[in-house]
Image (cartoon, helix red, strand yellow):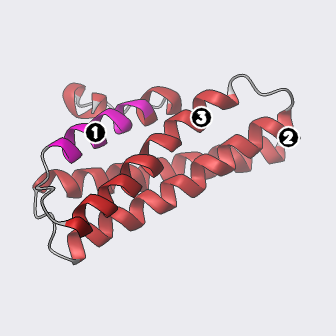
Amino acid sequence: MDRMKTGKPDTNLKNRSYSFSVSIVKFIDNLDQKKTSVQVIIRQLLRSATSIAANIAEAQAASSKKDFINFYHYALKSAHETKFWLRLLIDTGKSQNNQINELLQEVTELLKMISSAILTLKANS
């Protein structure tokens, strides 16, 4: 993730969420995918994690402020779902990789950033 490379937090939500998507793809590629349960979980994880950045990017082309906020709400829901799938991988022992803890921390930070952005957008409406 960019912030880990530079040591500085990347406050640009669009870039940070995209970097998170890249990290998730790389993480998934390194998981043992022989078991059906892992295959199902990682499909869901990939879908929800990449949806965060996709919805934030899509918000940039929103036709109204309400539409823009709605895309951020979708990103927030996807971030919550991503956190669930990461926790499930940890709690079922499917991944004991140290990277999963970093991913969990990053999605938690993204949740805070998206929530804050939504509150600010609504306050300015």
* Residue 24, x across and y down, in percent: 29, 43
- Residue underneath mark 2: 66
Work out whether mark 3 precedes mark 2 in sequence or the reverse, and give the earlier one.
Answer: 3
Residue furthest toward the bottom? 92
Element carrying mark 1: helix
Q: Nearer the viewer, mark 1 or mark 3?
A: 1
Marks 1 and 3, Cα distance to the nearest angstrom?
18 Å
Q: Quadrant of residue 90?
A: bottom left
Picture layout, residue 122 above or below residue 62: below
Give the label on residue 56, or none.
3
Marks 3 and 2, Cα distance to the nearest angstrom?
14 Å
Give the label on residue 25, or none.
1
Q: Inspect the image, locate mark 3, and give the three-letter code of the amino acid beneath it.
A: Ile
- The local crowd at label 2, few if under 14, some if 14 to 19, many if 20 or more residues have their Cα within 10 Å, is few
- Magenta segment includes 24: yes
Dominant SS in magenta: helix
Q: Is residue 18 left or right of residue 30?
A: right
